[in-house]
Amino acid sequence: MPGNIIELHADVPASRELQIFGQFDENRKLIERTLGVTLISRDGSLKILGPAGNANAAKSLLTELDRLAAKGSEITRQNVTYGLSMAMEQKTQVLSEIDKDFICNTVQGKPIRPKTLGQKEYVDQIRKKMIVFGVGPAGTGKTYLAMAMAVTAFRNEEVSRIILTRPAIEAGEKLGFLPGDLQSKVDPYLRPLYDALYQIMGADSFARNMEKGLIEVAPLAYMRGRTLDNAFIILDEAQNTTPAQMKMFLTRIGFGSKVIVTGDASQKDLPKDTVSGLDMAMRILRKIDDIAFCTLTSKDVVRHPLVQQIVQAYDDYEAQQQRKAHAHAQKHKVTIRKSGGNQQGPGRF
């Protein structure tokens, strides 16, 4: 064939093509478009035409997707998108390795697993360490995976209760004049935690355990003065804590407890010039052995693919702004040096 275009073959049974390629061949089109290859199905064999490197990447990915399909695992757009990024980095068998890591089932019977290498590392650290900080952008599964691990530990009687908390900080909106009692006022802050628990445990099981005091969902301020033994504790939206709140929370931990702290440093709702307790804790506690820090990135976003693009666009914009600010500062230093550094303050002679 002309140039470096090669032809490869991958064994993809016709019975699994629909599962792998998706409705209306959306996954096939995504692979072809991303890697610049052509996929031709014929008699249970898949012909791959394209540049050598891309054709090999496509074959590796299709082999991985076929392994998942053969096990009965659902092939999602997220699987394909992440598999493409791994194939282009020449990382093979990643999807199969991740798929082995089962956490629990939702109330509808859907398995919960990590979906990226970053998420797998996060889950592994939760299993090994007493305190884990999970930091990253929206959609990376920080809170949801922590919830799944908490429910699993609770069901296995590794802990006697689950405590979920987050600081009651408004995201640019004022909720203080909402009608109702105190619980009604704080519920909007805690709703994402309720939603995740409903999906994993079911509303009835959640309500029963709440009534018994075995599951507690409360604002961070309620943690003051308590010692939390034999509990799985999740602090969500930790970027909105102050240093004093973070210290207060971390010093509540008792024997037999496990703590997960999640946050997104790019979405702080604190007053201007207020230091984030999450940022400070990550600087102060890094050398303590039984504390792990997992940083998730836009590659670990598992919501709609558009969310990943939005997160990446914001990251690129912020990096560009930082480069401009640095260049401006360097230019200002050069100007001062050229002027001899004799800029005098007012009133000096």
Image (cartoon, helix red, strand yellow):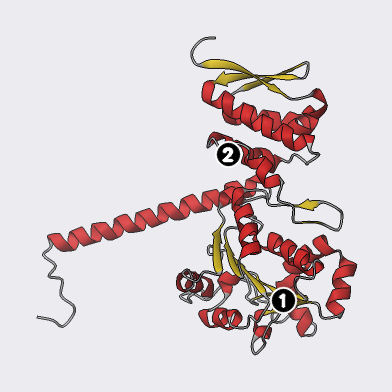
Foreground pick, 273 / 205: 205
Residue that extends furthest to the bottom in the rendered view of this protein: 225
Amino acid marked by disc 2: Met
Instruction: Work out how far the residue at label 1 is from the one at label 2, CA to CA, in angstroms.
Output: 37 Å
Above or below — where is 2 with respect to 236? above
The disc placed on residue 86 is 2
Amino acid marked by disc 1: Ala
Above or below — where is 310 with respect to 159? above
The N terminus lies in quadrant: top right
Residue shown at the point (77%, 19%) measured from the top left: 44
Q: Position of residue 243 (x, y in %)?
A: 51, 79
Q: On the picture, is 72 further left or further right than 101?
A: right
Q: On the picture, is 18 further left or further right than 165?
A: right
Q: Position of residue 296 (x, y in %)?
A: 57, 56
Q: For residue 27, which quarter of the picture?
A: top right
Crowding near pointer 2: few (<14 within 10 Å), some, many (20+)?
Answer: many
Secondary structure state at the residue bearing disc 1: strand
Q: On the picture, is 302 further left or further right than 348?
A: right
Q: Quick check: can you spot residue 166?
A: yes
Residue shown at the point (13%, 81%) measured from the top left: 348
Q: Are marks 1 and 2 in contact (CB under 8 Å)?
A: no
Crowding near pointer 1: few (<14 within 10 Å), some, many (20+)?
Answer: many
The disc placed on residue 231 is 1
Whichever of callouts 1 and 2 sits on the residue coming sooner in the sequence is 2
Secondary structure state at the residue bearing disc 2: helix
Q: Quick check: can you spot residue 268?
A: no
Residue shown at the point (58%, 58%) measured from the top left: 137
Residue shown at the point (70%, 34%) measured from the top left: 65
